[in-house]
Each structure stands twice: as C-alpha cells, then as structure tokens.
Image (tube, rainbow, N blue to C red):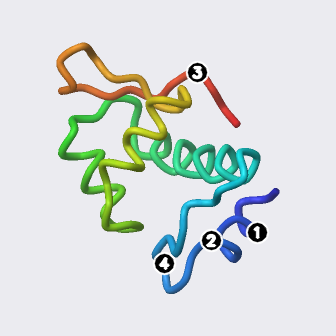
Amino acid sequence: MKQTEIYQKYFKEGRLVTIPKKEKAKLQLFAYFQEALAEQGQTFTEKEINDFFHRYYDDTAILRRYLVDYGFLKRDSYGRTYTIGERNG
C-alpha cells in the first residue's frame, strides 16, 4: 500500500482515526510512521517521539510501544533514547 493510500484510509484531517486490527495494515501504518520519523533524524528523546506522535494521535504511548515492539524503533534500556530500527516495512 502506498503512503497516500495509507493516509487516505487511516487519517482524517491529519489525525489517525484508528489503529488497524489486521497485522498487514498495522505494519504498513508503522512503516509509514517510521519513514516520517526518519525524515527528521535517526535519534530522538522520548519527548521528541511523543511530540511527533501527538500530532497524529492522542495515545502517544501506544504508538511508541507498537513501533518498539515491532522493531520500527529501538529504545535504550533506560527509555530515554529512541533510534530508527532496521525494519523497513
């Protein structure tokens, strides 16, 4: 699925409407976020990650956890620094 299709399907007025239930759709959405983050850098603080996700969705913690759990982001052992993961879709 292309980025424009993901955006049209899951976003309304720039905000994420819902996190998809189907695994394939989740992975596409998380890859979309990973790519958008990578355009801003490779290393982030938790505050920077939260600020990024807050533009799209109110529950920033769930998006942050999903991207870490699925390998799109890596978190240091203290939870202070996040880096773009090697997984790309």
Label 3, secondary structure: give it: loop
Q: Dot 3 corresponds to which residue?
A: 86
Ranked by sequence position, the earlier of labels 3 and 2 is 2
- Spatial CA span between label 2 and label 4: 10 Å
Where, quadrant-wise, is the N terminus in this rendering?
Answer: bottom right
Residue 59 versus residue 47 in the image, above or below = below
Label 2, secondary structure: give it: helix
Q: Quadrant of residue 68?
A: top left
- Spatial CA span between label 1 and label 2: 9 Å
- Spatial CA span between label 1 and label 3: 23 Å
Structural crowding at the residue carrying mark 4, measured as other residues with C-alpha within 10 Å and reported as few (<14), some (14–19) or many (≥20)? few
Asked whether 63 or 2 is in front, the reply is 63
Amino acid type at mark 1: Glu
- Specify whether 44 is left or right of 26: left
- Specify whether 53 is left or right of 13: left
Label 1, secondary structure: give it: helix
Q: Dot 2 corresponds to which residue?
A: 10
Q: Residue furthest right?
A: 1
- Spatial CA span between label 3 and label 2: 24 Å
Q: Dot 1 corresponds to which residue?
A: 5
Residue depicted at x 49% and y 45%:
39
